[in-house]
Amino acid sequence: MSKTALITGASSGIGAVYAQRFAARGHDLVLVARRADRLTDLATQLQQAHGISVRTIVADLSSEDGMATVEAVLRTKTIDILVNNAGMGPIAPTAVMSDADAAATLTLNVTALMRLTRAALPAMRLRKSGAIVNVGSVMAFHALPVSSLYSATKAFVLTWSRGIQQEVKDEGVLVQAVLPAGTITEFYDTAGVPIANFDQSVFMTAEQLVDAALVGLDRGEEVTLPSVHEADLWANYDAARQNLFGGTQNGSPAARYKAA
Ligand SMILES: NC(=O)c1ccc[n+]([C@@H]2O[C@H](COP(=O)([O-])OP(=O)(O)OC[C@H]3O[C@@H](n4cnc5c(N)ncnc54)[C@H](OP(=O)(O)O)[C@@H]3O)[C@@H](O)[C@H]2O)c1
């Protein structure tokens, strides 16, 4: 029986490439985004090219209605792969960003990802199979003066994924955190600073990013950093994190905090 993948943010960029790649694998698709015309065009093209079934859901995942609609699908249909990809990141200092952009960024990047993950997990645990791909960012461990909120939301994606990986590790469910660096998509137009303003040498294509992330997924990798050439960089970072946590478990203030 063919698998079904639900992909959020499938109307452009990374999500659209995930849709193409899963369609080529023969998976049926549920594609979610706000732009109905883009979703319909992609669905028609993938149905014709691969003979798969594609359902489109036009939903704003920064709204209660949009989140509830997609949650209901995840709770009532068999979804084998959930790709939490929809995201936004206005490039602006915290005090300057509009209230609407700040609220939408937090809701889309954090609340929607959390709710859809929770909606998908119970059935996957029961079936003892399934995969949740959470698209984070290398900004999960790096904050700039114009990325504070975005970086913090992506830190949530990484930490949330790391915790759930431990919850489901013996239950046949894979949770993969994919952390892209610069990727050529419409993200930067939406963010307010077109991609032409950045050093082009740090960007890869969305196709390169997704193909690398799928190699990681097929290997059962839990954290995938497609642009990191030295795998030890992640291993060392994660070991340092664990050492630091170990160093916090002391039950008394460190000597340097003794009042003078
Ligand atoms: N591009 C990069 O350099 C880069 C780097 C690191 C991480 N990422 C992450 O990669 C993911 C995909 O971004 P991308 O680069 O592919 O950018 P993109 O081309 O702008 O795609 C974003 C997708 O999210 C959807 N989306 C945005 N707001 C939404 C909402 N309120 N409700 C539902 N869907 C919404 C958009 O569709 P509609 O507008 O049609 O709703 C679009 O399909 C994001 O999570 C982003 O943070 C990107």
Image (tube, rainbow, N blue to C red):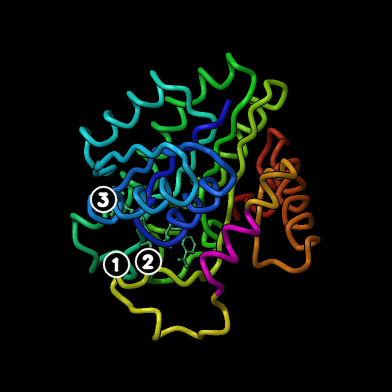
Give the percent coordinates (x, y) of residue 70: 32, 32
Please report contact status of discs 1 and 2: CB closer than 8 Å, yes or no: yes
Mark 1 C-beta to ligand 1 under 8 Å: yes
Q: Amino acid at mark 3?
A: Ala
Q: CA distance from mark 1 to mark 2?
A: 5 Å
Q: Quadrant of residue 202?
A: bottom right
Give the structural element (helix, strand or loop) at label 1.
Answer: helix
Q: Amino acid at mark 2?
A: Phe
Q: Nearer the viewer, residue 60 or 248?
A: 60
Q: Is residue 209 magenta?
A: yes
Please report contact status of discs 2 and 3: CB closer than 8 Å, yes or no: no
Q: Is residue 160 magenta?
A: no
Q: Which residue is mark 3?
A: 104
Position of 194 relative to 121 (above/below):
below
Q: Which residue is mark 2?
A: 187
Q: Amino acid at mark 1?
A: Thr
Of labels 2 and 3, earlier in sequence is 3
Position of 153 relative to 175 (above/below):
below
Q: CA distance from mark 2 to mark 3?
A: 15 Å
Q: Which residue is painted at 24% across and 42% down in the image?
A: 58
Give the percent coordinates (x, y) of residue 61: 29, 42
Give the structural element (helix, strand or loop) at label 3.
Answer: helix
**Left or right: 97 with respect to 120?**
left
Structural crowding at the residue carrying mark 1, measured as other residues with C-alpha within 10 Å and reported as few (<14), some (14–19) or many (≥20): few
Residue range (magenta): 204-213
Q: Give the mark toward the camera: 1 or 3.
A: 1
Mark 2 C-beta to ligand 1 under 8 Å: yes
Q: Which residue is painted at 50% across and 85% down in the image?
A: 199
Position of 135 relative to 226 (above/below):
above
Structural crowding at the residue carrying mark 2, measured as other residues with C-alpha within 10 Å and reported as few (<14), some (14–19) or many (≥20): many
Q: Which residue is mark 1?
A: 190
**Left or right: 52 with respect to 95?**
right
